[in-house]
Amino acid sequence: MKRFVVGLIGFLFVFSAQANVEADTLRDEVLKDLKENVLHFWEKYAVDPSGGFYGMILNDGTPRPDEAKGVVLNARILWTFSTAYRLFGDENYKHLANRAQRYLIDHFIDKELGGVYWSLHADGTPLDTEKQTYGMAFAIYGLSEHFRATGSTESLMQSIDLYKVLETQVREFENDGYIESFTRNWQVPPKYGYDGTGLASKTMNTHIHLLEAYTSLYRVWRNEGLQKRLNTLINLVVDKIYNPETNHLKLFFNNQWESLEDIDSYGHDIETGWLLTEAAEVLEDKALLKRIEPIAVNLTDAALKEGRNEDGSLIYERHGADYQRTLSWWCQAETIVGCVNVWQISGNEHYLHAADKTWEWVKARMIDKEHGEWFRSVTPEGMPDLKTPKASMWNCPYHNSRMGFELFLRLSAH
């Protein structure tokens, strides 16, 4: 019996050592891609000599100088290079972060009525002046990270000002949560949402990124009111947006939190699992973390079971009986981070293998080895969509760079 126990301990040690080797390899390969491919692409192609960053860059790196500039793209560039500077200390990363910070503050922030504009003309003058809550969330996210990386008190103060705008103008007090969008002067818009067609006054996507933004701000500003709102946001996601019967998220709501659509968005499911975990950890609330961790596992399990292909890639979503099987870049990045997160929660190496398998698919199908960065979309048959730009209102360095930062931090201390 003693020999059996000793042998079992030896087997487990070898198995754990193998997992460590797998994790180290995954970290090193992702870090190399982050520094030499993803960040390099944006350093090389994104800077607009006339100010800020180009609003659109085609797949081959060709800029479109006359395209509109979106606040989400600018704020995500700000966050990305702030984090890159904080972690790696490269002065060029700091220069790009400072450039993004200056442009956001000088051009996107509405200094008269508060909040941020959704988009600008290429020359930096306002274009779409509606106040999208999603855009304000990313402005907070980028500016608070810029303060964390550089110590800029201007960035911190602007983050706090935007937080106060959200709590006074955007928060819906009767049922709690945050309204999706407003006119420039904070009136009800003709239609809710950044695409101008939405009927939902509250959405999953905006709330999970407000969660992310408030988590980032709370790291650097330990304000009691913010602490309470971050805790409330976690509970809103868990109690109103998460569906414990399906282990998916509901996406669109009215003010009363009644669900308006039957959609499962697999990348958002996995992303939300690790964002919830991160928020509870930053709050240093062990009881809350104990509640969150099984939900993160459930969200990840359901998405992997229902949305993942045999080759490791993750499809986009289910809408009713129809499946959108497009393979989007951001879904793959979130799958890798989410699986590593659940591996660290559970100790089950199945999730580490799942992350590694998705990374192998990314290397084979999604990394653009000719022009750099990742293709934004790959067909179900594995062919890249060469017409989709690398940079646009939504396409940015945020999801895959964040994956690289997360794996660098998580797998350097495993």
Image (cartoon, grey):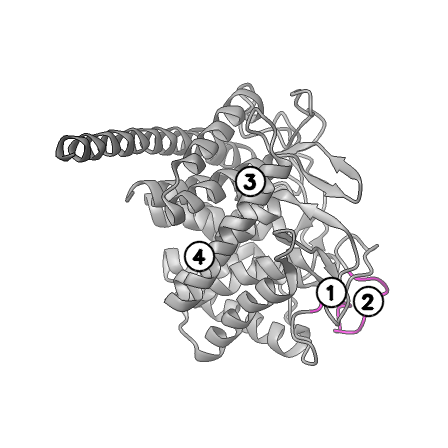
- Where disc 4 sits, the SS reads helix
Q: CA distance from mark 4 to mark 3?
A: 32 Å
Q: CA distance from mark 3 to mark 1?
A: 29 Å
- Where disc 1 sits, the SS reads strand
Query: How packed is label 4: few (under 14 Cα within 10 Å), some, or many (20 or more)?
Result: some
Q: Residue at x 59, y 58 (%)?
A: 208
Residue 216 visible in the shown view:
no
Q: Mark 4 or mark 2: which is in front?
A: 4
For label 2, the residue is 189
Query: How packed is label 3: few (under 14 Cα within 10 Å), some, or many (20 or more)?
Result: some
**Residue at the front extreme?**
1
Q: 14 above or below 279?
A: above
Q: Which mark is residue 181?
A: 1
Tell me which segment is drawn in magenta: 179-192
Query: How packed is label 1: few (under 14 Cα within 10 Å), some, or many (20 or more)?
Result: many
Could you tell which of marks 4 and 1 lies nearer the N-terminus?
1
Q: Mark 4 or mark 1: which is in front?
A: 4
Amino acid at pointer 2: Pro
Q: CA distance from mark 4 to mark 2?
A: 33 Å
Could you tell which of marks 3 and 1 lies nearer the N-terminus?
3
Amino acid at pointer 1: Ser
For label 3, the residue is 47
Amino acid at pointer 4: Glu
Measuring from the top left, give residue 339's x and y in whole percent. 47, 41
* Mark 2–mark 1 CB contact (< 8 Å): yes
- Where disc 2 sits, the SS reads loop
Q: Quadrant of residue 163?
A: bottom right
Could you tell which of marks 2 and 1 lies nearer the N-terminus?
1
